[in-house]
Amino acid sequence: MTNDFYQAAERRIWRFQLGLGAAGTLGAGWLAGWGAAAGFAVGAALSGINFLWLKQAVDAVAEKATGDETAAMRKKRRLLVWKFVGRYLLMAAAAYVTWKYTDWDIRALLAGLFVFVAAILSEIGWEVVSNQ
């Protein structure tokens, strides 16, 4: 498989995340009100950050494993480790703040965090259907 394949898949994953995040936010708002819409939107945004930071960490590991690591990437390694760990801290902090200090629906926020997973599954479905 070529690099073009992976770049196209990544673009589709981002589009799936945007579409699913928007649809989920509208659906949560329609079903449970503005608090649920806000919670889902924040969860979906955090899901996007999770995907970005995870991708950056995986790219760095792949570059190191293949010997393609640049000097700039070596300098960024510590930041990437903090991003890799920090994505969990960020999600936990958002859940705590939502639960403790807002009227937003914590269940909607937690559902929004799974937009990344739904986007990956959508990409898998896309590949299965489009490659038959």
Image (tube, grey):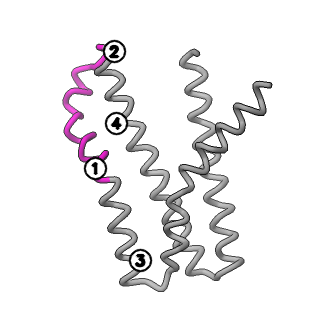
The kind of secondary structure element at disc 2 is: helix
Q: Which label was assigned to residue 19?
A: none
SS type, badge 1: helix
For the magenta stretch, what is the residue range? 67-86
**Mark 4 — residue?**
57
Magenta span: predominant SS is helix
* Mark 2 residue type: Thr
Q: Secondary structure at mark 3?
A: helix
Circle nearer the N terminus (2, 1): 2
Give the label on residue 66, or none.
Answer: 2
Is 52 included in the stretch rendered in magenta? no
Mark 3 vs 1, N-terminal side: 1
* Gap between marks 2 and 1 measured at Cα: 23 Å
- C-alpha span from label 4 to label 1: 10 Å
In this image, 47 relative to 115: left or right?
left
First of labels 4, 1 by sequence position: 4
> Circle 3 is placed at which residue position?
98
| Disc 2 packing (10 Å; few <14; some 14–19; many ≥20) | few
Gap between marks 3 and 4, in whole Å? 27 Å
Q: CA distance from mark 3 to mark 2?
A: 42 Å
Specify whether 28 is left or right of 59: right
Mark 4 to mark 2: distance in Å? Answer: 14 Å
Residue located beneath label 1 in the image: 85
Q: How many marks?
A: 4
Q: Residue at x 65, y 37 (%)?
A: 124
Q: Where is residue 77 shown, x and y percent of the image?
A: 23, 34
Label 3 or label 4, whichever comes before in sequence order: 4
- Contact? badges 3 and 1 (CB < 8 Å): no
- Amino acid type at circle 4 is Ala
Q: Identify the residue at horizontal 55%, vertical 65% (top origin).
A: 111
Name the quarter where the C terminus is drawn.
top right
Alpha carbon separation for disc pair 3 and 1: 21 Å
